[in-house]
Image: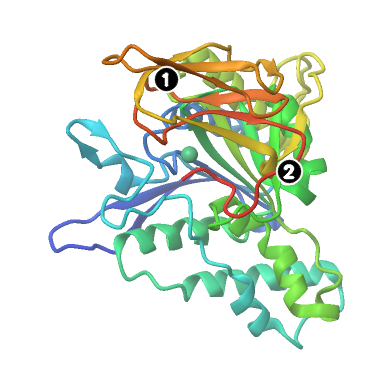
């Protein structure tokens, strides 16, 4: 394993931060998997899973079982990790700009199309290698005028030429669920099964350019820009955002299980040689066949927001299948004594809900994944 330190562009004199990446295996097989934890810095379950991944990858490397390169960034957001307001961690938004750390990743298909137009090799496998080289050049040319831009450039440089990108997050309180690009779902479903995730939310354009789509949707966007010349380009990157349940679920048993599932998926994708032993050996099959996860349009994920402030009492268990009109939560005005019952807007799976128990008007209280795409515009919550 090789440890690399990436110094970020300093925004103010006297301050410097760095990103650390761990590199396993060898790049000479030409394939690369990239995993990062806690891009939203206070989503801690991901960092614990990365800790367990680190141990597992070291063992696999020592056993000579890695095929290709596996890059692990165990804490993807040193800026956010340092942010606190009144002793409360603030890891989702950059306090300087107000920007979400998982939005606004640049669309590399434009510079790469300009670089490759009229130059693509006839052989599709040679084309993919050509594209990855051009992506690396495009990343190197990205502006990094401040620390946040420098963080985005560094992360994208590490990930954008990978075949597989797993971006590990969590929600407030939630069941394990995934976000991925719609055309990738057949390749991602085995990951959902290994993780025991009951739900995957699919979109081709979530809005505001999250990290996973910058890596995966780059390929079809590039093909579209190149027209007939790019018709043979593959979907060269499988990228997934993995939501590892709720923010308080920092638990060794869960993290070990999740790390094992991710290692198993790396084996599915050809990054780890088949195990010599059966059972729950890293890279082996899941212990038992898992139920088929629901794939639902991200545009069918329906938010329930607080119409006024008050004490929040959840009325339905996470992971419940609910019907439109079923009561999900009660909001109580502690001064006037009135209460409002909030109901599910659709039939679907109650997969995430707020962790705070006193909320102000407009707070996102719950999310229900329905079957019908009812929303448009930016589809991810702020
Ligand atoms: Zn997140």
> Of 305 and 15, which appears nearest the observer?
305
Considering every residue shown, the one lying at the far left of the view is 14
Q: Position of residue 13 (x, y in %)?
A: 14, 63
> Of 323 and 75, which appears nearest the observer?
323
**Residue drawn at 81 percent across, 79 percent down:** 227
Q: Residues within 10 Å of mark 2 (few under 14, many from 20)?
A: some
Nearer the camera: disc 2 or disc 1: 2
Horizontal relation, residue 22 to residue 299: left or right: left
> Of 122 and 117, which appears nearest the observer?
117
Q: Quadrant of residue 185?
A: top right
Q: Position of residue 163 (x, y in %)?
A: 69, 53
**Residue drawn at 82 percent across, 42 percent down:** 186
**Residue drawn at 75 percent across, 86 percent down:** 119
Horizontal relation, residue 293 to residue 108: left or right: right
Q: Is residue 29 above or below residue 78?
A: below
Q: Is residue 362 above or below residue 197?
A: below
Considering every residue shown, the one lying at the far bottom of the view is 118
Q: Which residue is mark 1?
A: 248
SS category of the residue bearing label 1: loop
Cβ of mark 1 under 8 Å from ligand 1: the answer is no
Q: Is residue 190 above or below residue 271?
A: above
Say which label, 2 or 1, has the lower sequence index. 1
Q: Residues within 10 Å of mark 1 (few under 14, many from 20)?
A: some
**Residue drawn at 23 percent across, 63 percent down:** 11
The answer, for residue 273, to whether it is visible in the render is: no
Check residue 373 in the rendering and tell me which mark sits there, or answer none: 2
Q: Position of residue 28 (x, y in %)?
A: 66, 57
Q: Quadrant of residue 380?
A: top right
Q: Quadrant of residue 324?
A: top right
Horizontal relation, residue 371 to residue 329: left or right: right
Work out how far the residue at label 2 is from the one at label 1, CA to CA, in angstroms. 30 Å
Check residue 6 in the rendering and tell me which mark sits there, or answer none: none
């Amino acid at each position: 394993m090789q440890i690399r330190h990436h110094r970020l562009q300093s925004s103010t004199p006297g301050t410097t931060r760095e990103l650390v990446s761990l590199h396993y295996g060898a790049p000479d097989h030409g394939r690369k998997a990239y995993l990062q934890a806690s891009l939203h810095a206070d989503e801690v379950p991901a960092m614990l899973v990365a800790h367990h991944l680190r141990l597992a990858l070291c063992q696999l490397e020592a056993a000579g079982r890695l095929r290709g390169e596996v890059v692990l960034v165990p804490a993807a957001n040193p800026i956010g990790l340092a942010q606190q307001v009144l002793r409360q961690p603030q890891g989702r938004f950059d306090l300087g700009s107000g920007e979400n750390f998982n939005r606004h990743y640049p669309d590399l298909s434009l510079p790469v199309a300009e670089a490759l137009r009229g130059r693509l090799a006839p052989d599709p496998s040679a084309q993919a290698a050509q594209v990855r080289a051009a992506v690396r050049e495009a990343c190197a040319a990205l502006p990094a005028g401040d620390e946040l831009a420098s963080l985005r450039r560094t992360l994208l440089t590490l990930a954008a030429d990978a075949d597989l990108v797993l971006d590990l997050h969590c929600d407030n309180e939630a069941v394990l669920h995934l976000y991925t690009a719609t055309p990738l779902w057949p390749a991602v479903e085995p990951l959902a099964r290994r993780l025991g995730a009951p739900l995957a939310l699919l979109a081709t354009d979530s809005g505001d350019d999250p990290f996973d789509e910058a890596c995966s949707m780059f390929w079809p966007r590039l093909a579209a820009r190149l027209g007939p010349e790019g018709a043979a380009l593959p979907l060269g990157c499988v990228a997934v955002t993995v939501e590892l349940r709720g923010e308080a679920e920092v638990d060794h048993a869960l993290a070990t299980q999740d790390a094992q599932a991710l290692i198993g998926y790396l084996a599915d994708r050809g990054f780890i040689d088949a195990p010599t032993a059966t059972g729950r050996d890293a890279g082996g099959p899941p212990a038992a066949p898992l139920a088929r996860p629901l794939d639902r349009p991200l545009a069918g994920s329906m938010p329930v927001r607080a119409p006024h402030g008050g004490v929040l009492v959840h009325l339905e268990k996470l992971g419940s299948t609910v019907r439109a009109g079923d009561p999900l939560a009660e909001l109580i005005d502690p001064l006037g004594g009135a209460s409002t019952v909030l109901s599910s807007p659709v039939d679907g799976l109650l997969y995430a809900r707020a962790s705070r128990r006193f909320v102000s008007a407009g707070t996102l209280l719950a999310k229900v994944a329905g079957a019908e795409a009812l929303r448009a515009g930016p589809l991810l919550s702020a």
